[in-house]
Amino acid sequence: MTEQPIKILIVEDEMIIGAKISMFLTELGYEVTGIFPRAEEVLTVLPGNTPDIALLDIQLKGSMDGIALAQVLHTEYNIPVIFLTANADDATFNRAKGTKPYAFLIKPFKKLDLQRALELTISLMANQPVPEQKPADEDVPYVLADRIFVRYKEKMVKILLEEILYIEAERNYCNVVTPTKTYLLSMPMKSLEDKLPATLFQRIHRSHIVNLKQVNEVDESHVVIGSKALPLSKSMREEFLMRIKTV
């Protein structure tokens, strides 16, 4: 399946709070990979069950607290961490900062607070600033080396770049086409094109961008991907043919 919900790990020793967070995440369209009360339990399931983001309570029972666990997740697995805390003294806060968390959430928090913290984390993962303003009806995609995070049907989803077949303009929207699904995104194709890696994607027409690794055939006026023939602009043909040789 091409669409992959963003995977979130919860480490919270108060199971009622953990269950509530899990409910919020499910409602927001994320996938909860597990709810663990102790840090030691988390280490037994990694790396076989690696999340995209971890939500960690700072105060945990056992030999490891959330800060110690965050250090392991950061250095050994490169998993972004959001800390959850009801209160923290200066020494604890400074120690937590040393693990380079992506955000702090103060308990109790609302679903909107959680949503904003996660979207901030995703933007930081992609090393892209969160815009203060954006055009009406336009969502901002977050592109990492091998995946893209986009808002689709009111939730954030993860799409692997290598599985994108092509992108098609539709006025101020664009369709991202994969082997199993087409995603209609509320942004102009140009906005998405500017964020895609040029090593993998190439515009072939004013209305189409293709994944160079997905091209099956090329003729004088068309590029074939799967069973779909896409128009190849004369003005873009030479550059496209040069690019296709390097893939």
Image (spheres, helix red, strand yellow):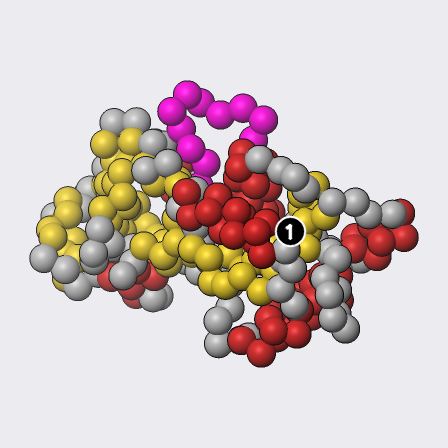
User: Where does the image place residue 72, in percent across and percent down from the top left?
Assistant: 69, 70
Q: Who's the residue at 53% across and 37% down the image?
A: 111
User: Where does the image place residue 74, in percent across and percent down from the top left?
Assistant: 67, 65
Q: Which residues are magenta?
A: 125-142
Q: Residue furthest front?
A: 16
> Would you name the residue on which mark 1 appears?
82
Task: Name the amino acid, label 1.
Answer: Ile
Q: Who's the residue at 61% across and 73% down the image?
A: 41
Residue 159 vs 40, above or below: the answer is above
User: Where does the image place residue 89, in percent across and percent down from the top left?
Assistant: 87, 47
Left/right placement of residue 227 relative to residue 62 reads: left
Q: Who's the residue at 56% across and 41% down the image?
A: 114
Task: Evaluate whether residue 126 shows in this view.
Answer: no
Task: Evaluate whether residue 27 shows in this view.
Answer: yes
Left/right placement of residue 192 relative to residue 219 reads: right
Q: Residues within 10 Å of mark 1 (few under 14, many from 20)?
A: many
Residue 153 vs 88, above or below: the answer is above
Of residue 71 and residue 123, the one placed in the foreground of this image is: 71
- Split into 4 quadrants, where in the image is the C terminus? bottom left
User: Where does the image place residue 243, in percent across and percent down from the top left?
Assistant: 33, 58
Q: Predominant secondary structure in magenta?
A: loop
Magenta segment: does it hold 35? no
Q: Who's the residue at 20% across and 42% down the image?
A: 233
Of residue 115 and residue 135, the one placed in the foreground of this image is: 115
- Split into 4 quadrants, where in the image is the N terminus? bottom left
Left/right placement of residue 216 relative to residue 213 reads: left
